[in-house]
């Protein structure tokens, strides 16, 4: 199962480069990442999904700015969050680094904006794209995983919100 995230060509290129002591194949790997990023960009733009957007930061295809709107019917409704996405040389076989730029008080987001979401960690698959990442984070806002909180105070408040009255 883990082999779905392995890029045989990249593994072979990195092994060859390590043996030769050079960085050959690096530009080819970056070209592959560029193509995948362009494809992801077109998917986000053409999807028509409300409440999400993403685009490269200036002319850098490896660093993006994303936005998500808080899901309706949640405490995040009406809020818009900005995120940063950074794509490693191993993308799409390695997850991008995604974090909140806009402060977000949430059980699965720490004070630095880092997100605890399984598809960005151990459940990552090369099948995921920027659109699916943003939709997953948007969904996480309304349905946190309190079994694995990064922010214990937010998790405790989330668990106790049903007892609160407004």
Image (tube, rainbow, N blue to C red):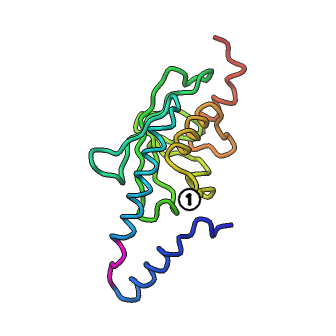
Q: Tell whether 17 sits left or right of 122.
A: left
In the picture as drawn, the residue positioned furthest to the bottom comes out as 19
Vertical order, 63 against 74 (above or below): below
Q: Is residue 44 visible?
A: yes
Q: Residues within 10 Å of mark 1 (few under 14, many from 20)?
A: some
- For the C terminus, the image quarter is top right
SS label for mark 1: loop
User: Residue 44's spot in the image, x, y percent?
Assistant: 47, 40
Q: Which of the 4 image quadrants contains residue 122? A: bottom right
Queried whether the magenta region covers residue 145, the answer comes back as no
Q: Which of the 4 image quadrants contains residue 154? A: top right
Residue sitting at x 51%, y 57%: 95
Dominant secondary structure of the residues highlighted in magenta in the image: loop
Residue sitting at x 44%, y 56%: 36
Residue at the disc numbered 1: 126
In the picture as drawn, the residue positioned furthest to the right comes out as 163
Residue sitting at x 58%, y 33%: 141
Vertical order, 6 against 109 (above or below): below
Q: Is residue 153 visible?
A: no
User: Residue 113's spot in the image, x, y percent?
Assistant: 46, 42
Q: Tell whether 162 sits left or right of 96.
A: right
Taking depth in this image into account, of 93 and 9 the one nearest to the observer is 9
In the picture as drawn, the residue positioned furthest to the top comes out as 166
Q: Which residues are magenta?
A: 22-26
Taking depth in this image into account, of 26 and 80 the one nearest to the observer is 26
Taking depth in this image into account, of 75 and 163 the one nearest to the observer is 75
- For the N terminus, the image quarter is bottom right
Residue sitting at x 67%, y 40%: 146
């Amino acid at each position: 199962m883990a082999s779905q995230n392995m890029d045989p060509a990249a593994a072979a290129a990195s092994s060859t480069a390590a043996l030769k002591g050079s960085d050959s194949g690096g530009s080819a790997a970056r070209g592959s990442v560029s193509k995948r990023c362009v494809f992801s960009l077109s998917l986000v733009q053409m999807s028509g999904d409300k409440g999400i957007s993403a685009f490269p930061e200036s002319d850098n295809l490896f660093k993006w700015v994303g936005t998500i709107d808080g899901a309706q019917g949640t405490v995040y409704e009406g809020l818009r969050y900005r995120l940063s996405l950074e794509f490693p040389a191993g993308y799409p076989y390695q997850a991008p680094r995604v974090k909140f730029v806009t402060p977000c008080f949430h059980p699965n987001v720490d004070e630095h904006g880092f997100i605890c979401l399984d598809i960005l960690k151990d459940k990552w698959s090369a099948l995921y794209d920027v659109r699916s990442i943003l939709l997953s984070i948007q969904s996480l806002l309304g349905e946190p995983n309190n079994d694995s909180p990064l922010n214990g105070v937010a998790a405790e408040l989330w668990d106790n919100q049903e007892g609160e009255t407004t």
